[in-house]
Image: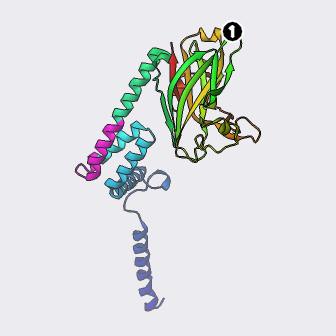
Amino acid sequence: MTMRNFARAPLAAMLAVAALAACKPSSPPAAGGGPDPNDIVALRAEVERLRKENADLRLSPYQLAIEVEGAMRAANEEKAVATYKQLSDTFPVAPETVEMKKRLETFLAQRRATEDEEKRIAALGFKGLPVNANFAHQDVALSLASVSVNKRWTFDSWGDGWRFLDSEKDRKMLVARMNVASKQKNPSLFGLAAYVPDGNKLVKVGDMRYRFARWGSYGAFLGTTTDYGNEFSHRSRIPFTAAVSVADDDLKKRPLYVVATKEGCHARHFERFGQPQVAYMPVDCGTLKPSLTLEDFKGGALAVLKRID
């Protein structure tokens, strides 16, 4: 072995030892050779903390106020209260916090009032339903003038004449007189029906049909002369009468309820040889079901116009 080769051997050995020392871990590896589970848990917790911090930094009073408003519109009281608490805790002096506090208080007060009314109605049954002779929806409004039980229903009057319909024996006519107002030129009219109580429900005894209360003249009734008095395209308010034949046995089941629905259940119809030529004819009216419960009145689509005790 030459001197050059002898010198290279210790140098190679030293380099090998240094390389092995560099590859040796400073501490013993975790069981199985994987990362330390405690480190993984700590890293995940830190990631979650940073995510939450990032989300909080992106929040603004305006965004939280929108969430409170959306929850109130959806009638989600729990979410509205929780989101407002987050708004007030994070931004206590923001203008949105002050405004949302007022709106939330109004929302909660209305909710309490509604709950109290529902409890009152539940305690009194159908007699607890509010009775209002005025009923409106969108551009149509009905104002009830009177309701009576008679043998005869008169309608389509003109001058000193009129048409009439008499009830059959063992029956009576439930007659309502009203005014209907509308900004529309051809509105549908509200559905009307008579109901009587039967335990925990109201049972329908008949759907009411509309007739015009009067005409300007006999010629107007026949359609031979022009009369715009019963045209919504020319008049905003028109008098009507509506009635239904009810059996005497049903009339004994007091109280008798006249129920209206927001659904348009009567449409204008023209018949060239009709007398009169124009009348409102009934169409399908799904909300005036054969029987109603208190739940059916909660949405506001139905209302009691008159209760006859």
Seen in the picture, residue 305 relative to 66 is either above or below; the reply is above
Crowd tier of the residue under label 1, counting other residues whose Cα lies within 10 Å: few below 14, some 14–19, many 20 or above: few
Left or right: 155, with 80 as reference point = right
Snapshot quadrant of residue 46: bottom left
Q: At 39% from the left edge and 37% from the top edge, which residue is drawn?
A: 78
Q: At 41% from the left edge and 87% from the top edge, which residue is drawn?
A: 7
The colour scheme is rainbow
Left or right: 200, with 45 as reference point = right
Looking at the image, which is closer to me, 82 or 147?
Answer: 147
- Is disc 1 placed on a helix, strand or loop? loop
Give the labeled residue for mark 1.
170
Left or right: 32, with 192 as reference point = left
The picture places residue 232, in percent across and down from the top left corner, at 58, 44
Snapshot quadrant of residue 22: bottom left
Q: Which residues are magenta?
A: 88-107
Magenta span: chief secondary structure: helix
The picture places residue 200, in percent across and down from the top left corner, at 56, 15
Asked if the magenta segment contains residue 46, the reply would be: no
Seen in the picture, residue 219 relative to 3 is either above or below; the reply is above
Q: At 46% from the left edge and 41% from the top edge, which residue is drawn?
A: 74
Q: At 46% from the left edge and 23% from the top edge, which residue is drawn?
A: 131
The picture places residue 239, in percent across and down from the top left corner, at 55, 34
**Going by the picture, which residue comes out furthest to the front?**
160
Whether residue 162 appears in this view of the structure is: yes
Left or right: 116, with 298 as reference point = left
Seen in the picture, residue 172 relative to 224 is either above or below; the reply is above
Whether residue 85 appears in this view of the structure is: no
Looking at the image, which is closer to me, 130 or 165?
Answer: 165
Q: Amino acid at mark 1?
A: Asp
